[in-house]
Amino acid sequence: MYSKCGNVQKACRIFNKMQKKDLISWNSMIGGLAYNGFGEDAIALFYKMIEENQKPNDVTFVGILTACTHAGLVDLGLQFFHSMKSEYSLMPKVEHCACIVDLFCRSGRLEDAYNFIRGLEIEPNVVIWGTLLSACRIYSNFELAKISVEKLLELEPDNSSNYILFSNMCADAGQWEEARRMRNLMRSKNVQKLAAYSWIELDNTLHKFLVGDKSHLKSSEIYEVANGLSLQIKWVPELDLEQPV
């Protein structure tokens, strides 16, 4: 609970006070450190877990591979991945494979990520191909992006974000024909872009807002306040950053 709330210090304090730590406790702490960006600490805790003769399971390796991803430790992550089968008789699942793809992609090693996917014994899922596609956008790898989006359109043809991401990437690369083809394909399959709502809960009632939407009962009051705030922002004088505020 403390780890998921971002309070890693308190989570560690409670973990260290535990007289008997079971596998769930170790996994929770390793995962908590990894997901909060304390990759090296998570790895150190994994080694301590092994020293205390606690055998890891597949959940442990999701945490430790995530830790390597956040710390940028590609070679060490690959060592952990291969040790699953060789040292602990654990067959890697799609979650572990997704971690390795993410590990390669975050390091800019997109070709390695693609070769890894091609060599998988299990069927790559949307998370794996989506991770590669997103990395292709960052590193401007058009060829691998095209392969990734084709796989994604087979697996989830109704997901508008895949069409839009690749179409935008084509436009950035000056591939206008490919961008138009993707938009036309989206229209022919009647795939709609999901509207992005903002929401707030007030007095146990959920209020949703969309750009230009006037369906709310108090929309006129809301827009009046929003317009007033916009004017105030425009009128705020520039701050002198050399003087204390």
Image (spheres, rainbow, N blue to C red):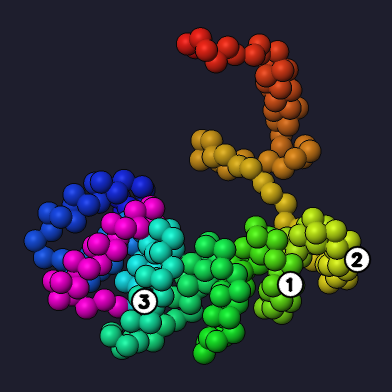
Q: Between disc 1 and disc 3, whose residue precedes?
A: 3
Q: Between disc 1 and disc 2, whose residue precedes?
A: 1
Measured in 3D between alpha carbons, the distance from the residue under mark 1 to the one under mark 3, in whole angstroms, is: 29 Å
Is 54 included in the stretch rendered in magenta?
yes
Foreground pick, 209 / 205: 209
Secondary structure state at the residue bearing disc 2: helix
- Residue 16's place in the image compared with 240, above or below, is below
- Residue 203's place in the image compared with 92, above or below, is above
Magenta segment main secondary structure:
helix
Which residue in the protein does label 3 denote?
79
Q: Residue at x 71, y 76 (%)?
A: 147
Q: Residues within 10 Å of mark 2 (few under 14, many from 20)?
A: few
Q: Residue at x 54, y 80 (%)?
A: 116
Q: Is residue 68 visible?
A: yes
Indicate left or right for 49 with 75 as reference: left
- Residue 127's place in the image compared with 192, above or below, is below
Q: Position of residue 84 (x, y in %)?
A: 34, 82
Which residue in the protein does label 2 denote?
177
Chain part drawn in magenta: 35-57
Q: Are marks 1 and 3 in contact (CB under 8 Å)?
A: no
Q: Position of residue 115 (x, y in %)?
A: 58, 81
Amino acid identity at mark 1: Glu
Amino acid identity at mark 3: Gln
Residue 143 image label: 1
